[in-house]
Image (cartoon, helix red, strand yellow):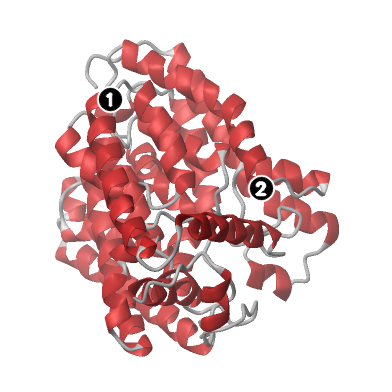
């Protein structure tokens, strides 16, 4: 019976059914309405961070007010910004281009900008769903795209991105397009503008593209990223000295790492291995340590990626190389659960059994990794509101909030092992 259901789900006729499409999109709209209602009921008035009311807090603190300050020549990284605008603190070291990208919001009243941003987030989610369905070689139908969009919105990563108003969809789309078309510089290079909005994405991505030997893409992408950020910095330099900007960035990073909600000991959001190690050691390391720790952690992924590149395995966002890249970005350096959107294409391809892109995997490895990654994406046990509801504290809190990083690390280990065990499949 189970086999018959699986075959039915994998048939083109099922995904071309108008009834399936109608049902999928109804559930997606219900999920959108539910999240919209929760944003309204848990809306965070701009100002100090409130654990109990986080609705659209990241839009206020990370997008709208930074863009508004930037438009007026005020550095969003500095203390002056934190004092003049209703925010929790200065923004951490996002790429300066983030403010340029979100500058149109600064021209609108806050509530108008909020409505526009929510609508754009939905469009970005649909774009991500379409890309995932296309790259995973699912049928290009409304039902299939809707099913992926529904999967995204019910994951903790998708839900939290909509609820808090963060810009994770943009970074995920940029990173996924970069990985999928890393052999086409004119497509992947511009996509790196989005992928590199945060250094914690940019650094491992650049390293892994080098391991793939995609030098032209790197040259195009890094040049565009550098030019875009220099333009943003040039604007701020009209109102601030270079020394002041550097001091602001250092202050912002210090305040970020000293935020009790960001400290590994307290955080419920981290999915990187060093964050979890620090949690169990009751330690709050500095940013330099995270960068140094990334080196030994990323070396196995570099070697596995180079091995696949040398053996001419296709490099995309949904093959073994793409799976390793997504997991590596998450595990090796500072990341949160919402960043798991990066591995949605690979996990959909794992479940869909896209043979041309995942023929390097054994059935056991494919199923195990699919289950582990899906558990991370659907893990609401470590969500703050769930732990508060059930009073999860002490050792239970430590275990629950460490689970995501451990599962991702295991999946990455399996993927790296498969990369070295299997020879290139010429069908890829």
Location of residue 249 (image quadrant): bottom right
In the foreground, 271 or 95: 95
Badge 2: residue crowd in 10 Å (few <14, some 14–19, many ≥20): some
Q: Rounded to the nearest whole Å, what is the CA distance between mark 1 and mark 2?
A: 34 Å
Q: Residue, x 29% and y 15% (percent of image)?
A: 425
* Mark 1 residue element: loop
Provide residue 65's location: percent of width, then percent of height.
Answer: 43, 77
Name of the residue lying farthest toward the right: 394
Earlier residue among tags 1 and 2: 1
Name the quarter where the C terminus is drawn: top left
User: In which quadrant of the rendered view does residue 224 lie?
Assistant: top left
Looking at the rendered image, the disc whose residue lies closer to the viewer, 1 or 2, is 1
Q: Is residue 396 left or right of residue 421?
A: right
Query: Position of 239 compared to 112: left or right?
Result: right
Q: Which residue is mark 1?
A: 214
- Return the mark for residue 35: none
| Residue 184 seen | yes
Q: What residue sits 39% from the left and 68% below the top?
A: 239
């Amino acid at each position: 019976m189970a086999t018959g259901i699986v075959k039915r789900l994998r048939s083109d006729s099922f995904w071309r059914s108008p009834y399936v499409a109608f049902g999928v999109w109804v559930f997606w709209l219900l999920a959108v309405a539910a999240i919209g209602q929760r944003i309204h009921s848990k809306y965070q008035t701009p100002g100090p961070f409130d654990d109990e009311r986080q609705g659209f807090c990241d839009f206020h603190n990370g997008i709208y007010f930074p863009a508004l300050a930037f438009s007026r020549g005020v550095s969003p990284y500095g203390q002056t910004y934190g004092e003049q605008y209703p925010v929790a603190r200065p923004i951490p070291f996002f790429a300066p281009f983030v403010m340029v990208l979100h500058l149109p919001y600064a021209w609108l009243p806050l509530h108008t900008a909020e409505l526009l941003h929510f609508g754009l987030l939905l469009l970005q989610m649909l774009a991500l769903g379409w890309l995932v369905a296309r790259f995973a070689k699912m049928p290009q139908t409304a039902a299939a795209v809707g099913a992926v969009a529904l999967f995204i919105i019910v994951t903790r990563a998708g839900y939290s991105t909509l609820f808090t108003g963060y810009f994770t969809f943009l970074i995920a789309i940029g990173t996924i397009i970069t990985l999928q078309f890393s052999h086409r510089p004119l497509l992947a290079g511009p996509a790196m503008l989005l992928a590199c909005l945060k250094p914690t994405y940019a650094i491992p991505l650049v390293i892994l593209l080098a391991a793939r030997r995609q030098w032209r893409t790197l040259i195009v992408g890094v040049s565009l990223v550098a030019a875009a950020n220099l333009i943003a910095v040039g604007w701020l330099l009209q109102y601030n000295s270079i020394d002041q900007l550097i001091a602001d960035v250092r202050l912002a990073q210090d305040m970020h790492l000293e935020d009790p909600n960001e400290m590994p000991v307290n955080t419920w959001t981290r999915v990187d291995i060093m964050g979890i190690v620090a949690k169990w050691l009751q330690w709050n390391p500095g940013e330099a340590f995270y960068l140094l720790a990334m080196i030994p952690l990323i070396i196995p992924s570099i070697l596995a990626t180079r091995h696949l590149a040398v053996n001419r395995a296709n490099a995309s966002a949904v093959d073994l190389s793409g799976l390793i890249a997504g997991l590596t970005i998450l595990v090796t350096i500072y990341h949160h659960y919402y960043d798991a959107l990066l591995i949605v294409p690979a996990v959909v391809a794992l479940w869909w059994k896209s043979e041309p892109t995942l023929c390097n995997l054994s059935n056991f490895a494919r199923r195990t990794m699919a289950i582990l990654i899906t558990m991370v994406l659907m893990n609401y046990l470590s969500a703050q509101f769930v732990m508060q509801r059930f009073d999860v504290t002490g050792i239970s809190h430590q275990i629950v909030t460490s689970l995501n990083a451990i599962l991702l690390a295991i999946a990455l280990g399996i993927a790296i092992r498969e990369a070295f065990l299997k020879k290139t499949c010429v069908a890829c």
